[in-house]
């Protein structure tokens, strides 16, 4: 098996493209085949090296590497033209000089007659000599149908009359996508083509080119779209982000992979897959034939899972290497324990980092914060005095002290816990009081309480 991922380097790699890449890569790995990359960079105006680099960076972050050097389609232009001229000489394609005005006229008439606009084959049998400025059109069979058995969508077919004699070489001499893709799939000896279902019509055209070139047709698997949660095109807010952005937000590679494959693929009831399991179980035929929907919640669920699952020292090293941590935090002797606590309730590393400030910066006692803190100051004073006597070396002892203080004073937890959390962190949602006291430390905690009492 030889599969390929063929991005056009006209933009970054997004969720949909990354999913196609992973499915294509897994498909090859599951069959011990080869996974290749082809950059379809024939659109000179829109393609650029920045996107090539960005796509490769995204893929390599996900652990997807090509088994052979990536092929750049633009480097094969001469070959594409040579093959097109060969088709022309064999009478399987023809030169066409129909003016844009005539094409437009035909289109208008077809529209008036409620017909699908298509080239009417005007030059098909004129045998025009091929001159500069002419296009070369492919001679579609006039009879019969073109069909293939899609690995996901099952049988797809079209009456050949529906497909017009499409252009394979433009008037400026450049070859078109459908022609290049078919020719390069032959060159790369591709056995399985996996791509979005927006390419189905292209596949039907490409099969005809492959037939004309007497090449074997590969197997095809067309992936249904990834839509927004509302079933619309993905927008920036819901998944149309550069994959590299997810890395910057602190999504872990394992979470991203797990999430991407769940966009359409299921295996029994299993939710979490290691790479080995994916390679073992993946089968492109089991991809769902209806559109997948992007869900930030599910991505967060996977990331939270892997944040908690990763060995804490490795996670710390990863965060330290890829994100900027403040010097104050790096010098904190409890930094590993702090990350260990915060990861439990975080969806990504940036959220963890945002929370770190509570451990080394006193909360700003704004008017708004002060009015939300409801506590008897005498009680708080008593708490502070007793807290100063507690052994802070053991978290357990802090917990015991808290329980005793509450029962001795006949208090329900929120009476003390709620205001104390606000005083210590400035936030109403933060880790447990015991964890906060232990990780912020006795001195800083008593200082923060003191500061509040003095107002
Ligand atoms: N370059 C096409 C795209 O980015 C992919 C075509 C293909 O896989 O053949 O949609």
Image (cartoon, rainbow, N blue to C red):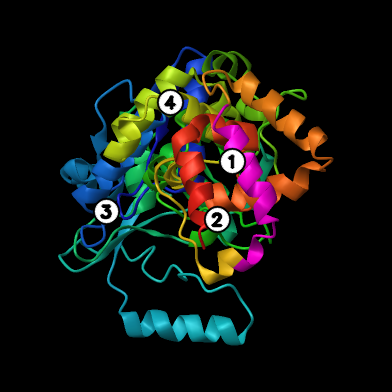
Observer-side mark, 2 or 4, equals 2
Rounded to the nearest angstrom, the CA distance separating label 2 from label 1 is 10 Å
Q: Residue at x 54, y 13 (%)?
A: 276
- Magenta stretch? 371-389
Identify the secondary structure beneath mark 2. Answer: helix
Observer-side mark, 2 or 3, equals 2
Label 2 within 8 A of ligand 1 by Cβ: no
**Residues at badges 1 and 3 in contact (C-beta under 8 Å)?**
no
Q: Earlier in the sequence, mark 1 or mark 4?
A: 4
Q: Earlier in the sequence, mark 2 or mark 1?
A: 1
What residue is shown with label 3? Answer: 175
**Residues at badges 2 and 1 in contact (C-beta under 8 Å)?**
yes
Rounded to the nearest angstrom, the CA distance separating label 2 from label 4 is 27 Å
What residue is shown with label 1? Answer: 384
Rounded to the nearest angstrom, the CA distance separating label 2 from label 3 is 77 Å
Identify the secondary structure beneath mark 3. Answer: loop
Q: Earlier in the sequence, mark 1 or mark 3?
A: 3
């Amino acid at each position: 098996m030889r599969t390929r991922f063929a991005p056009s380097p006209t933009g970054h790699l997004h969720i949909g493209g990354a999913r196609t890449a992973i499915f294509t890569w897994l498909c090859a790995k599951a069959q011990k085949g080869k996974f290749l990359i082809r950059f379809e960079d024939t659109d000179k105006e829109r393609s650029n090296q920045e996107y090539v680099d960005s796509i490769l960076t995204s893929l390599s972050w996900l652990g997807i590497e090509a088994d052979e050097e990536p092929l750049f389609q633009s480097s094969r232009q001469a070959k594409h033209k040579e093959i097109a001229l060969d088709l022309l000489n064999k009478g399987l394609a023809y030169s066409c000089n129909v003016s844009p005005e005539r094409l437009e006229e035909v289109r208008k008439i077809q529209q008036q007659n409620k017909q699908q606009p298509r080239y009417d084959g005007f030059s098909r049998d004129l045998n025009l000599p091929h001159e500069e400025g002419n296009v070369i059109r492919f001679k579609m069979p006039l009879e019969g149908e073109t069909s293939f058995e899609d690995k996901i969508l099952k049988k797809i077919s079209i009456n050949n009359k529906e497909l017009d004699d499409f252009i394979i070489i433009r008037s400026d001499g450049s070859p078109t996508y459908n022609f290049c893709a078919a020719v390069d799939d032959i060159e790369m000896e591709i056995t399985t083509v996996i791509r979005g279902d927006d390419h189905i019509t292209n596949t039907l055209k490409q099969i005809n080119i492959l037939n004309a070139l007497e090449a074997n047709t590969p197997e095809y698997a067309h992936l249904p779209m990834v839509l927004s949660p509302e079933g619309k095109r993905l927008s920036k807010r819901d998944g149309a982000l550069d994959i590299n952005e997810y890395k910057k937000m602190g999504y872990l590679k394992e979470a991203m992979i797990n999430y991407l494959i769940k966009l359409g693929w299921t295996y029994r009831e299993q939710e979490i897959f290691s790479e080995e399991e994916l390679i073992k179980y993946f089968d492109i035929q089991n991809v769902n034939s209806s559109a997948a929907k992007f869900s930030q919640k599910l991505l967060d669920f996977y990331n939270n899972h892997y944040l908690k699952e990763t060995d804490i020292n490795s996670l710390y090293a990863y965060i330290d290497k890829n994100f900027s941590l403040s010097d104050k935090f790096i010098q904190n002797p409890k930094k590993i324990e702090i990350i260990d606590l915060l990861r439990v309730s975080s969806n990504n590393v940036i959220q963890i980092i945002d929370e770190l400030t509570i451990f080394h910066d006193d909360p700003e006692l704004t008017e708004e914060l002060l009015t939300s803190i409801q506590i008897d100051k005498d009680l708080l004073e008593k708490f502070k005095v007793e807290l100063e006597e507690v052994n802070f070396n053991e978290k357990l002892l802090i917990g015991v002290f808290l329980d005793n203080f509450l029962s001795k004073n006949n208090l329900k937890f929120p009476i003390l816990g709620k205001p104390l959390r606000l005083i210590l962190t400035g936030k109403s949602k933060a880790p447990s009081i015991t964890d906060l006291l232990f990780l912020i430390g006795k001195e800083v905690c008593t200082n923060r309480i003191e500061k509040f009492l003095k107002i």
